[in-house]
Amino acid sequence: MTLYGDGRAAIQDDAEMAGRLKWATRRRSRPEPKIVLVPREGDPRREPWVCPPRIDPAAGVEAFRRGARRKHWSYLSGVPGVPRYLARLAVPPDPRGVRVGLAGVGRVGGTAAAVLTATPVERSGIRELLIYDVDGANLERWQHELGSIAGFRSGVELPRVRPTALNQVFHQCDVFVFAATVDVPALGTREDVRMVQFAPNRAILRSCLAQARAADFAGLFLVVSDPVDWLCLAAFLDSQADAAGGFSGAGLAPERIAGIGLGVMWGRALMAARREGFENEVAGAGAAFGPHGKDVLVFDDLRHPSPVRSELLSHAAREGNMIVRHLGFLPYVAPAVSSVALALPRLLAGEEVLSSTFVRGLWFGGPSRYDFGVHPSPHPMAAEVETQLAALHARLARQSVATLGPDPKSPF
Ligand SMILES: NC(=O)c1ccc[n+]([C@@H]2O[C@H](COP(=O)([O-])OP(=O)(O)OC[C@H]3O[C@@H](n4cnc5c(N)ncnc54)[C@H](O)[C@@H]3O)[C@@H](O)[C@H]2O)c1
């Protein structure tokens, strides 16, 4: 057995990858590596590229029920984008915290940024917030607003806020958050207010992906904008386009893309449970799955789901945004706080959150954890819960063809 690489990660018995990474045979004087990686064969359109031992890379939605216990980490050999991520994995996390780049400082982005700026670095793990918006006056406004957040002699370190430019942000940040939109549909819109944003937001996203490629970005890529889950898929596929429109495998690793939109769905479901008098049971035993959209599924209890309660919670999660809209306001405070500002620090700390992760070629929401990539985290669940998740995944896979159009890069 030969190990390559002198850092906290080492690869085992893959001289070719070691050569690409310029990792020499590990010196005997070095301590045991924290992470040992072995090569794996698989479809880069359906499997995580770099995978921790607790994840079965070939699992579908069953990853929400059962984990794996492999001896080592693994990576897809022969995928051109993988070495960039292995090199990043070998670098220990910066103890001072991460730098978060935020594109789109609007209602959602601005509110989330305000909460994150008021959260001590010690708690959030975020030492710097780099903000970017296409609207220069708006960017300047938020620079002043966020820059003026401070406590008197609190002795508490808050994140630094700096404006940045699109061609700079991917060189400067560890985590990129996409919260830009061309336009949120006005009050009274009859269409699906999320899906209607897909084409215009995908176009903005493409301009970000071009900059990510130019910067050889290996950080985490988080999507807040709607439709969250479809934009995650678009970010993955669009980042892979080669000159002929085929799948290059040189773009973003799928497990390094996650959607953060399920937090507010959960908040809306819990609010309904509170009203009905069973919040505590749901908070301890329930969970939300699927997209930040009308197909979201909420269960009151994963082991012993009540169809009546689960339907009530799912309905509340689906319709919560419309209640605020019918009152004459655009909903953005709970989304910014629950989906982003409360979720991001926990996600970065490796704690369990609700986010949309890569599951067999699609982005699918559920309990998840960050472990270099964002992956489903398993919970015991009743057979009928898993059956519903599998049916939803299959439906979304079919829908992906209609949503994205024919795409030679898509696995569906
Ligand atoms: N994930 C969630 O939980 C959740 C919940 C509610 C809404 N949303 C979505 O979040 C997105 C943002 O909503 P909002 O209410 O903040 O919108 P907004 O219109 O208030 O803000 C969007 C911001 O994006 C900026 N922008 C536009 N084009 C840009 C570009 N090319 N580069 C950088 N910035 C650009 C605009 O100048 C604006 O400041 C929408 O897609 C909305 O549907 C997500």
Image (cartoon, grey):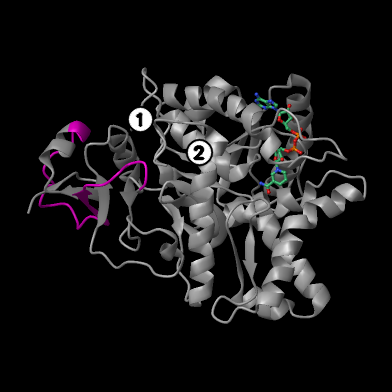
Q: Cβ of disc 2 within 8 Å of ligand 1?
A: no
- Residue type at mark 2 is Val
Q: Which residue is depicted at the point 36% across and 22% down?
A: 242
Q: Which residue is mark 1?
A: 247
Is the magenta region chiefly helix, strand or loop? loop
- State the residue in front, 280 or 362: 362
- Residue 35 shown in magenta: yes
Quadrant of the image occupied by residue 309: bottom right
Q: Would residue 45 be found to the left or right of residue 79 on screen?
A: right
Q: Which residue is depicted at the point 40% across and 58% down?
A: 60
Q: Callout 2: 10 Å neighbours few (<14), some, many (20+)? A: some
Q: Position of residue 407 (x, y in %)?
A: 44, 31
Query: The magenta stretch spans which residues?
Result: 20-46
Q: Which residue is mark 2?
A: 401
- State the residue in front, 28 or 49: 49
Q: Nearer the viewer, mark 2 or mark 1?
A: 2
Q: Cβ of disc 1 within 8 Å of ligand 1?
A: no
* Count of numbered tags: 2
Asked if residue 379 is positioned above or below residue 41 in the image, the reply reads: below
In the orientation shown, which residue stands out farthest toward the top? 243
Can residue 158 be seen in this snapshot? yes
Q: Would residue 166 be found to the left or right of residue 278 on screen?
A: left
- Residue type at mark 1 is Phe
Say which mark, if any, is on residue 22. Answer: none
Q: Quadrant of the N terminus?
A: bottom left
Q: Secondary structure at mark 2?
A: helix
Quadrant of the image occupied by residue 330: top right
Q: Earlier in the sequence, mark 2 or mark 1?
A: 1
Q: Callout 1: 10 Å neighbours few (<14), some, many (20+)? A: many
